[in-house]
Image (tube, grey):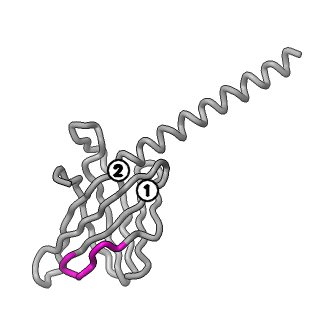
Amino acid sequence: MSKLRTFFSLSAFSLILLLAFASVATAQESRLAGVWRGAFNINIGGDREFILTISADGEQLSAVLDIPAQGIMGLTAESVAIDGSTFRFLFPRIEGEYYGVIHSDRAPDGNPSRMDGDWSQAGEYIPISLHRSLAE
């Protein structure tokens, strides 16, 4: 009888740990919600603004991309993946993706304030650092 009790105690403890880690991961992902801005330069016409707006709906993240100089406005990411401190946003309609690392810099509210990554579009790779916009 004590082996059965030990098994159920360990199972319950494992379940509690699993739920705790899942809620921490969800909380971390939702902390990315907001407007992220950066710029890139391809030596044609100067800097181009890159705006990624991330929204959280419970456990689901979504992202919308704006690159005004390219006429890209309100393009929804078809895939958003966050795994620890790495991320990947896919925009297959324009053969684009933004992927990289959530930097350890924190804003005064404790949320991440910088992401460092590469924008890839049609085979070209451009490094872009995004900073959380304070004015949303």
Q: Is residue 107 left or right of residue 91?
A: left
Please give left or right for residue 91 compared with residue 23 in the image.
left
Q: Which picture quadrant has residue 122?
A: bottom left
* Pointer 2 with pointer 1, Cβ within 8 A: yes
Which residue corresponds to the image point at 38% horizontal and 70% vertical from the top-left?
76
Q: Quadrant of residue 35?
A: bottom left
Asked which secondary structure carries label 1, the reply is: strand
Measuring from the top left, give residue 114's x and y in whole percent: 26, 52
Q: Please tell me which residue lies in front, 31 or 128.
A: 31
User: Which amino acid type is shown beneath numbered disc 1?
Assistant: Leu
Residue 74 lies in magenta, yes or no?
Answer: yes
Q: Please tell me how crowded label 2 is: few (under 14), some (14-19), or many (20+) other residues with Cα within 10 Å.
A: many
For the residue pair 24 and 125, the one nearer the viewer reads as: 24
- Identify the magenta region: 68-75
Residue found at the very far top of the displayed protein: 2
Position of the C terminus by quadrant: bottom left
Q: Which mark, residue 61?
A: 1
Q: Residues within 10 Å of mark 1 (few under 14, many from 20)?
A: some
Whole-percent x, y for residue 107 in the image = 23, 41
Disc ID at residue 96? none
Q: Is residue 86 above or below residue 119?
A: above
Q: Residue at x 29, y 58 (%)?
A: 116
At a point 16% along the width and 53% down the height, the residue shown is 135
Q: Secondary structure at mark 2?
A: loop
* Along the line of sight, the residue nearer the viewer: 34 or 3: 34
Q: Which mark is residue 32?
A: 2
Residue 7 vertical placement versus 118 (above, below):
above
Residue 15: horizontal and vertical position, in percent?
66, 33
Hey, which quadrant is residue 90 in on the image?
bottom left
Question: Residue 73: horizontal and vertical position, in percent?
Answer: 27, 75
Q: Tell me the amino acid under the disc marked 2.
A: Leu
Quarter that holds the N terminus: top right
